[in-house]
Image (cartoon, coloured by chain):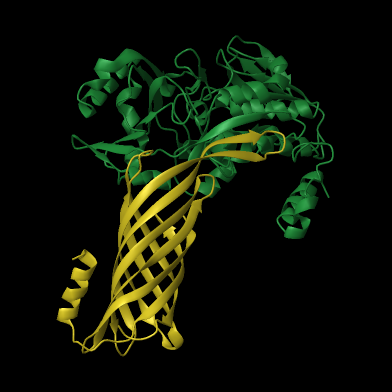
Chain colours: A green, B yellow
């Protein structure tokens, strides 16, 4: 029995009253991704240093595998990014919510010897309004149906930076966009935009799916049709966030822009960015994804801010202009190595597409990212778990 | 004249003078505010006045009510209140329908922060007590089966009123069993 299986059996037993006290069967403090049957000894290149790429590196480092992470952007994190010095708390410019039981944070670190804790707040807005047909109306009871979590004093970036990245940073190359992956020879040759060539035995691809859809990386030979079709079957819509600091609060916890009874309205939201953070800054955040984001995605940041302030003024009788202190936009569609939001729709059977997205190619190319999560697509923890699963598969597959 | 006595008089005038026996009731059920906050409810009531009609009996009853419910990772709430009901019961089938007005105090232990131990995954929750007044109006129906045990189901709606949180609509569904006990003679 592998350790992972043993731990899973322990977890199952611990749900029974008699065995609950015996659940502490993690003798060396390592978690389920530690005790795997490693049968690979070569070199790995990870493409992308978002949450999935960093998680892949974290697990490879723990198993002493020779690896390198190549990140196209000048910073790690991908769609996880932090904004400091804008409010009296750090702001998530990208992924913000913890779409799961917060204990998932411990499972992502997967090491019971880690000393540390993190504070999260339940995000269940109390005052909810919808601005629809020129009127604001309250739907406060709507908050009873929604509760997730957010970090209180840190961010997803801070979490990755503190607990995942330290093991990975020595092997991380920033500003290194990969332009081709050639697996036609004995070893895989990965070429970056400067023409530098690196060789590896296996590659883990963790780039945003939109990067693959837009053919920013040339795979030689071409990827199998099933893989290519799956990549193009997923819609990655436009997405952006904006942040406004006001000198006083005039807005509810959540403002839905549209008919609150339509799902699509929840793709365009203003929300109190300081909810339950015990902060002094009046931060109103804007989240927009999908079709509503198309109206902003091609605008420059100043035009986006002007447009959004105009919309807020319409909803709050000019209060936005009167109280605005500063604003900032994060247009993910305009990020050259992101190009959109996150996996949103699947043309065809979800399970089949997911299976083809995750399936390794020729035992050489492995795949991970938010779009490849087996349980929680479009989430940070889902991206990281997909990376762990891909790396475990890679390591358990013999040379 | 209090509203309750006025209602009793009006009902009394509308129904025949012959009065069925008064009873005490105990209600035990499951409840689910907003459909997503499962919990239990316990209520007792006593018939203050009864009237007998040709096919239906009517009763005015009052009593206390307790409920507890919650939502994982969000809150645990307790409700203590009183309700007054007017109940019409079919004389032969035992089927009844009631209209209920209630006033309650609802205390919610709202989780405002969770500390995650990153090594063990254990969660330490910080709760804040929130206080609400809860006026409600409801409709229940059910059947008084033989041997004084019956079933009931119903819906209630009202409004959370609180100085700490924004007011909001309240509604819940409830179902369970009800037990009847003789109140010791007709009134």
Q: Is residue A113 left or right of residue A150?
A: right
| Position above or below: A339 against B110 | above
Frontmost residue, A177 versus B80: B80
Residue B170 in the image, given as x and y percentages of width and height: 34, 52
Q: Which image quarter: residue A73?
A: top right
Residue drawn at x 63%, y 16% as measured from the top left: A191
**Quadrant in the rendering for residue B181:** bottom left
Whether residue A397 is visible, yes or no, is no
Judging depth in this view, the residue of A232 and A124 nearest the camera is A124
Residue A76, percent from left and from top: 59, 18
Q: Residue furthest top?
A: A194
The vertical placement of A36 against B60, above or below, is above
Report if residue A115 is visible in the image: yes
Q: Residue at x 56, y 27 (%)?
A: A156
Hey, which quadrant is residue B36 in on the image?
A: bottom left
Indicate whether A398 appears above or below B180: above
Image quadrant containing the C terminus of chain B: bottom left
Give the percent coordinates (x, y) of residue A26.
Answer: 80, 42
Q: Residue furthest front?
A: B1
Is A24 or B178 nearer to us in this picture? Answer: B178
Q: Which residue corresponds to the image point at 45% horizontal and 17% vertical from the top-left?
A: A87
* Nearer to us in this view, B130 or A104: B130
């Amino acid at each position: 029995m592998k350790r992972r299986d043993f731990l899973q059996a322990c977890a199952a037993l611990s749900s029974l009253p008699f065995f609950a006290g015996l659940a502490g069967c993690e003798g060396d403090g390592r978690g389920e991704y530690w005790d795997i049957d490693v049968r690979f000894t070569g070199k790995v290149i990870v493409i992308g240093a978002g949450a999935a790429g960093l998680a892949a590196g974290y697990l490879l480092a723990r198993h002493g595998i020779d690896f390198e992470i190549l990140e196209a952007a000048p910073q790690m994190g991908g769609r996880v990014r932090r904004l400091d010095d804008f409010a009296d708390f750090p702001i998530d410019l990208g992924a913000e919510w913890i779409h799961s039981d917060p204990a998932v944070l411990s499972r992502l670190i997967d090491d019971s010897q880690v000393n540390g804790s993190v504070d999260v707040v339940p995000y269940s807005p109390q005052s909810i309004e919808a601005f629809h047909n020129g009127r604001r109306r309250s739907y406060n009871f709507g908050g009873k149906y929604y509760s997730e979590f957010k970090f209180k004093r840190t961010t997803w970036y801070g979490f990755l930076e503190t607990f995942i990245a330290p093991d990975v940073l020595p092997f991380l190359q920033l500003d290194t966009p990969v332009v081709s992956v050639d697996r036609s020879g004995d070893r895989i040759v990965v070429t970056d935009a400067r023409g530098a060539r690196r060789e590896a035995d296996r590659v883990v691809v963790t780039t945003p799916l939109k990067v693959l859809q837009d053919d920013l990386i040339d795979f030689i030979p071409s990827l199998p049709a099933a893989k290519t079709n799956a990549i193009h079957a997923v819609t990655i819509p436009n997405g952006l966030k904006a942040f406004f600091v006001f000198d006083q609060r005039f807005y509810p916890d959540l403002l839905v822009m549209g008919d609150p009874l339509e799902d699509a309205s929840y793709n365009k939201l203003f929300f109190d960015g300081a909810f339950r953070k015990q902060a002094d800054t009046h931060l109103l955040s804007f989240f927009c994804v999908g079709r509503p984001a198309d109206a902003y995605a091609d605008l420059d940041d100043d035009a986006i801010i002007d447009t959004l302030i105009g919309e807020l003024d319409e909803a709050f009788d000019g209060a936005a202009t009167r109280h605005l202190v500063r604003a900032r936009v994060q247009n993910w569609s305009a990020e050259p190595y992101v190009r959109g939001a996150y996996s949103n729709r699947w043309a065809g059977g979800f399970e089949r597409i997911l299976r083809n997205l995750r399936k390794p190619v020729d035992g050489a190319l492995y795949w991970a990212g938010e779009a490849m999560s087996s349980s929680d697509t479009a989430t940070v923890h889902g991206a990281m778990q997909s990376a762990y699963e891909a790396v475990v598969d890679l390591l358990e597959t013999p040379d | 004249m209090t509203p309750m006595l006025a209602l009793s008089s009006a009902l009394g005038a509308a129904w025949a003078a012959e009065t069925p026996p008064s009873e005490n009731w105990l209600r035990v059920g499951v409840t689910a505010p907003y459909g997503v906050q499962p919990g239990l409810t316990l209520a007792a009531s006593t018939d203050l006045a009864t009237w007998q009609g040709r096919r239906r009996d009517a009763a005015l009853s009052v009593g206390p009510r307790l409920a507890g419910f919650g939502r994982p990772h969000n809150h645990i709430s307790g409700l203590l209140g009183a309700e007054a009901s007017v109940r019409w019961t079919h004389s032969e089938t035992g089927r009844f329908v009631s209209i209920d007005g209630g006033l309650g105090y609802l205390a919610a232990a709202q989780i405002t922060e969770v500390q995650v131990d990153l090594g063990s995954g254990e969660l330490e929750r910080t709760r804040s007590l929130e206080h609400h007044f809860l006026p409600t109006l409801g409709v229940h129906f059910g059947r008084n089966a033989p041997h004084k045990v019956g079933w009931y189901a119903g819906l209630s709606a009202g409004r959370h009123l609180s100085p700490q949180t924004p007011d909001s609509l309240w509604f819940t569904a409830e179902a369970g069993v009800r037990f009847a006990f003789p109140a010791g003679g007709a009134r």
